[in-house]
Image (cartoon, rainbow, N blue to C red):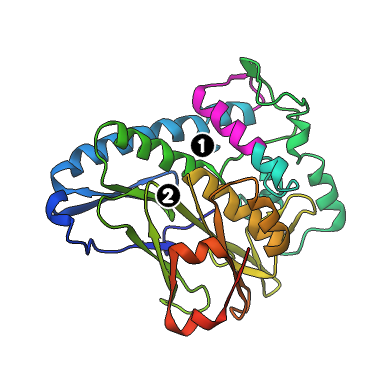
């Protein structure tokens, strides 16, 4: 759900005196999961860090990609029975919690609606009719896959109901970042940052990573800078990332799976959380829910904070905790409303 052409957050240069202890920082990128992945680490450890991160991310992509016929998700979407691997089981559990806490706005079965609106496959020339949306909604709904109260207890394998498709695009990149970050930490590469198209997680001794959050209403502008410490993560969802244009009007790729319609009202939501998977899933859910209901959802994710930007760029609402990790540009300082 995040494009690589303009990352929602930009890596800043290492500015701290502690860099003498870490050595000079290097940065290397490659393409994976439909985006650009960057690893930033001390130059002496960079080659090893890239190898570790690449392997972890490739593992996740091989299991979760809906575009690979041989992946677990690819086989399920083709109507085949597929086993529940550790990666798939973990993401299913994370997705189930997000679905339950978000009033159904986070839904990995939203794929048929994405196709209907022309975000995948053939572009549309007209807006879908109410009848088309109603028919498509019959194949959408996480509760049609997971109906038991004791989830995440899962069978060793399962088959999707006919017509349904899984797509973990709203959490997969964040989860892949977490997988890479954890392996890097286990390997002793402690001063590192992993960025997969804007899903970011990092740790650095001595001083935080400084991540610029873009201003969605000003080309090249930024709202301010986030300070990531202690393995914290961030992700952003925005209407500008992907859209279709029908009859001269733009429709964003973030669709409310309850109604079948693209969401309006908010231009961007940035989330900081303890994991990139949580930040990724929350940024999508909060975008659909808006600040009032969104902040209620955040109560289920201790430590998670968020910043909402309205579609005209004039209303900025953030949790109070977000302000402790975020330094706004001077021109925005008086325009952000912080709420408990």
Q: Nearer the viewer, residue 282 or 132?
A: 282
Q: Which residue is mark 1?
A: 65
Q: Nearer the viewer, residue 128 or 203?
A: 203
Q: Nearer the viewer, residue 80 or 311?
A: 311
Q: Which residues are magenta?
A: 78-96
Q: Nearer the viewer, residue 167 or 90?
A: 90
Residue 244 horizontal side relative to residue 201, left or right: right
Q: Is residue 248 magenta?
A: no
Q: Residues within 10 Å of mark 2 (few under 14, many from 20)?
A: many
Q: Which residue is mark 2?
A: 232
Q: Is residue 84 magenta?
A: yes
Residue 52 horizontal side relative to residue 95, left or right: left
Q: Position of residue 92 (x, y in %)?
A: 61, 32
Q: Position of residue 53 (x, y in %)?
A: 32, 38
Question: Relative to 283, is 44 above or below?
Answer: above
Q: Residue drawn 61% across and 54% down?
A: 284
Residue 123 visible in rendering? no
Label 2 or label 1, whichever comes before in sequence order: 1
* Number of numbered discs on residues: 2
Q: Residue drawn 49% across and 80% down?
A: 333
Give residue 239's quadrant in the image.
Answer: bottom right
Q: Position of residue 327 (x, y in %)?
A: 42, 71
**Real-space Cα separation, disc 2 to disc 1, in angstroms:** 25 Å
Residue 21 horizontal side relative to residue 56, left or right: left
- Identify the element where label 2 is drawn: loop
Question: Relative to 320, is 139 above or below?
Answer: above
Q: Residue drawn 28% across and 57% down?
A: 207
Residue 151 horizontal side relative to residue 334, left or right: right
- Which residue sits furthest right? 131
- Identify the element where label 1 is drawn: loop
């Amino acid at each position: 759900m995040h494009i690589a052409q303009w990352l929602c957050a930009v890596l800043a240069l290492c500015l701290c005196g502690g860099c003498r202890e870490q050595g000079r920082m290097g940065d290397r990128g490659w393409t994976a999961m439909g985006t650009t992945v960057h690893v930033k680490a001390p130059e002496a450890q960079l080659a090893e860090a890239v190898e570790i991160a690449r392997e972890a991310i490739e593992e996740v992509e091989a299991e979760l990609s809906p575009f690979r016929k041989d992946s677990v998700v690819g086989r399920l979407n083709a109507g085949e029975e597929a086993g529940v691997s550790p990666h798939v089981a973990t993401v299913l559990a994370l997705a189930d919690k997000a679905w339950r806490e978000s009033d159904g706005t986070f839904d990995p079965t939203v794929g048929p609606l994405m196709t209907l609106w022309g975000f995948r496959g053939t572009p549309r020339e007209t807006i879908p009719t109410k009848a088309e949306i109603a028919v498509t909604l019959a194949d959408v709904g996480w509760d049609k896959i997971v109906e038991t109260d004791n989830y995440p207890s899962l069978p060793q394998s399962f088959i999707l109901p006919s017509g349904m498709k899984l797509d973990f695009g709203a959490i997969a990149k964040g989860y892949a970042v977490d997988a890479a970050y954890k392996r890097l930490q286990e390997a002793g590469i402690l001063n590192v940052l992993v960025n997969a198209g804007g899903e970011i997680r990092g740790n650095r001794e001595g001083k935080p990573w400084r991540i610029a959050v873009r201003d969605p209403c000003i080309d090249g502008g930024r709202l301010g800078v986030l300070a990531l410490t202690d393995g914290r993560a961030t992700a952003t969802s925005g209407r500008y990332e992907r859209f279709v244009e029908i009859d001269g009007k733009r429709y964003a790729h973030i669709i409310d799976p309850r109604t079948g319609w693209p969401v309006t009202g908010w231009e961007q939501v940035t989330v900081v959380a303890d994991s990139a998977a949580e930040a990724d899933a929350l940024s999508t859910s909060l975008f659909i829910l808006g600040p009032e209901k969104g902040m209620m959802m955040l109560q289920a994710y201790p430590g998670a904070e968020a910043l909402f930007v309205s579609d005209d760029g004039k209303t900025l609402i953030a949790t109070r905790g977000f302000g402790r990790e975020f330094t706004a540009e001077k021109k925005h300082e008086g325009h952000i409303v912080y709420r408990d």
